[in-house]
Amino acid sequence: MSSLSSSLVFAQQTIIRYGFPVSLTLGNIGNFFIIVVFCRKKHRRNPCSLYLLAAAVFSIIGINWGIGSNMYALYQPPDPFIQSLFLCRFRGYILQTSSLLYKCMILLGCVDRFALTSPRAGIRAFSKPKFALKMIGGFILFGLLISIHLPINQTILNNRCLPSGTYGFFFSIYQVCIFGVILPISQIFFSFLIVKNLKLVRVRIQPMPATDSIPQNILTRHDITLIKLILTEIILGILLTTLYPISTLYSILTSNLLNKSADRIAIESFMSFLALIILFYLNYCITFYIYLAISKPFRQEIKQMVLKTIKRLEPEQINTGAHSINKDSVQNGQKPKRVGDGSASILTVSLAFSGQCDGVQSLLTTTTYPTDNNLALTHAL
């Protein structure tokens, strides 16, 4: 093996060893927050939020099966996915289906925003939560069926789990058509229609959703935010996944070339690794952080959610502290008293100390622990 081949193999292993754990952690955390946010009641009423929620679910599946399986193969050799034909085919099927459905959910979100911004009431009628749920279910069934050829024909060859032979050529064409042509062009087409509709119709941003009594098309702030998220998601996805169909197409065109040098084979393998593992799965990992960067309402919602969670934990800590003081006072022979002030109970613990010198004085220490609504801690000597 030449020095170039060794360097590329070492770089690939280094990326897997150190870059993958960070990407996997950030991706799971980010998609978890997206799921929590869009599972809230006000978001479940919006069809575009449902599409983004479904996309986050498929994103978690994709990064855990894509990145997680590569990490497991590196840290726990030998690689079970190149030893078991069932695991090889099952992993490929899950990865292919989750990737396809993720892209389809983003496309459906774009179509929904086009329908919402349309000046025609008949088209706007498709932007409904019930219709979105039907579309999500239908596309899940479509994705499961259209990818069924992969677990049937994929095989293990030269310690690699991949499509080979005639099917390998067919699968490469399939990948280029789906991920390089159909989905990107469809997303770009509906994105331009959204921009065109926003220019044609008079858009009014109001804090409350529009009612049926208002005949003209009215977009809320939440609708505008979702349009920004969808368009950014499309731009980001196209930038990060463009190299993948190009790399696949190159592999098809050069598959019949003979006498490839070891360095060329190593370079092609490394470029395929970058196209599929790095850029393709990176799209799953950074979505949440892109949302935070471009959307102020999304940041505020995440902040409020975190603060509310912290406030729920504070009363438990205060109650735990009050119970500890009460227990200590009983062990010291003191009787704690609770004094009601109409809004909260006040725990008063009196500790008396005596001395042997003249003029014995009593030191009364009163510690007040507010509970529930009181948030001040008073310590008086």
Image (cartoon, rainbow, N blue to C red):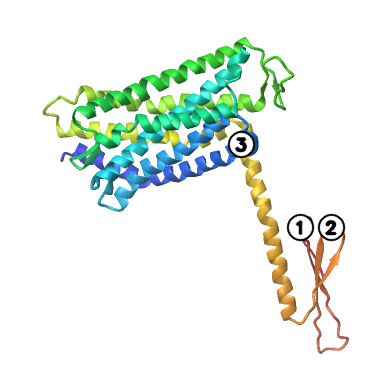
Q: Earlier in the sequence, mark 3 or mark 2?
A: 3
Q: Is residue 59 above or below residue 239?
A: below
Query: Mark 3 against mark 2, which lies toward the viewer?
Result: 2
Report if the CB atoms under discs 2 and 1 are less than 8 Å apart.
yes
Judged left or right of residue 1, residue 127 is right
124 or 226, nearer to the observer:
124
Q: Quadrant of the rendered structure where residue 342 is?
A: bottom right
**Closer to the camera: disc 3 or disc 1?**
1
Asked if residue 290 can be seen in this view, the reply is yes
Residue type pointed to by label 3:
Arg
User: Which residue is identified by label 2?
Assistant: 343
Mark 3 Cα shell of 10 Å, populated few (<14), some (14-19), many (≥20): some
Give the numbered dot on residue 299. Answer: 3
Q: Which residue is mark 1?
A: 372
Q: Quadrant of residue 89?
A: top left
Pointer 3 or 1: first along the chain:
3
Please, what is the three-letter code of the amino acid marked with disc 1? Answer: Asp
Secondary element at tag 2 = loop
Q: Residue at x 27, y 44 (%)?
A: 86
Name the residue rendered at 50%, 25% in the picture.
108
Element at label 1: loop
> Taking 365 as reference, is 208 above or below it?
above
